[in-house]
Amino acid sequence: MGNANEMSFLDHLEELRWHLIRSTLAILIFASLAFIAKDFIFDTLIFGPKKIDFPTYQWFCSISQSFGQGDSFCITEMPFRIQSRTVAGQFSAHLWTSILAGFIVAFPYIIYEFWRFVSPGLHANERKHARGFIFVASLLFFIGVLFGYYMVTPLSINFLGNYTVSGEVFNDFDLSSYIGLLRTSVLASGLIFELPIIIYFLTKVGVVTPTFLSKNRKFALVIVLSLSAIITPPDIVSQVIVSIPLLILYELSIFISKFTFKRIEKELQNL
């Protein structure tokens, strides 16, 4: 006979629906707060990387001077303007940026809801060992978001804002294009930094092994360099800056995979 406590497929769908509803409500609540805080969100956060006193530019300038390169890496101007060319352009940017901010702030709660959905299917010892999952996943995501905001975004904006094919052309960037660049840089970095968590689960289900990850390190290097080339300007300095943390994440993923694999082997031996 089946277990009386076992849920049917439709029960699982219903449970998933409520987890998604609660996650969506959390996003909407934080998005509403971000919508109200329009001045801070746009003037300080969104348009921060286009100002010459942005911390990243100051940091690169200080490094340049420290290594005797003078002001070669100092930013003195941002030769472009941001415009809105559609009737609802500014309102649309305000709305979707607020939703993006709501998603980022609500991410720990979204992970919590995801964990509540999958944890009943785990053994008691697996739930105990994964107790810090929400904290670690959230921490990695926020580190990735900060990396995307303070490194990838300013490098991209500085390069593209100063790039020109002719002195006859002036850069007038559309508001949606500018925010799209920032959104992609921030979210892509945040999700990429979840790599150790993804590797942990893939190791748990037997899709990858530490041996597989170690043997394919050279292919991972090519993928990392390709990702760096996609999300950064086509200059070697920017690509190296972005590649270093990605390679560190990959090595961390191998360590996590080894630790998880050994624990699985130990549990199988004890059966």
Image: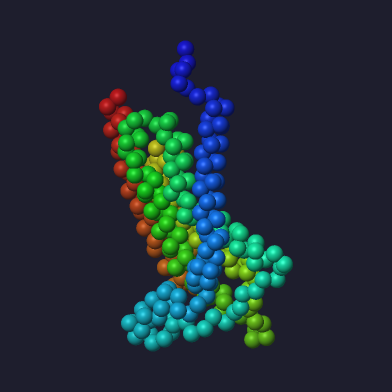
Q: Residue furthest right?
A: 87
Q: Please name the residue shown 40% across and 54% down the image.
A: 140
132 in relation to 118, above or below: below
Q: Please name the residue shown 42% across and 73% down the image.
A: 56
Q: Residue furthest front?
A: 36
Task: Give whichever of 260, 147 is nearer the camera.
Answer: 147
Q: Where is residue 205 shown, x and y percent of the image? A: 43, 36
Q: Where is residue 104 shown, x and y percent of the image? A: 49, 55
In the rendered image, which quarter is residue 68 located in? bottom left
Task: Give whichever of 219, 130 is nearer the camera.
Answer: 130
28 in relation to 263, above or below: below
Report the quarter where the C terminus lies.
top left
Q: Please name the residue shown 52% across and 57% down the image.
A: 33
Q: Where is residue 8 shown, x and y percent of the image? A: 53, 24
Task: Give whichever of 200, 227 is nearer the camera.
Answer: 200
Q: Where is residue 135 shown, x and y percent of the image? A: 37, 48
Question: Along the horizontal axis of the image, is 165 left or right of 116?
Answer: right
Question: Along the horizontal axis of the image, is 226 left or right of 143?
Answer: right
Q: Please name the residue shown 56% across and 32% down the image.
A: 13
Question: Is there any visible trace of residue 156 in the rendered image?
Answer: no
Question: Is there any visible trace of residue 33 in the rendered image?
Answer: yes
Task: Give whichever of 258, 113 is nearer the camera.
Answer: 113
Question: Along the horizontal axis of the image, is 170 left or right of 157?
Answer: right
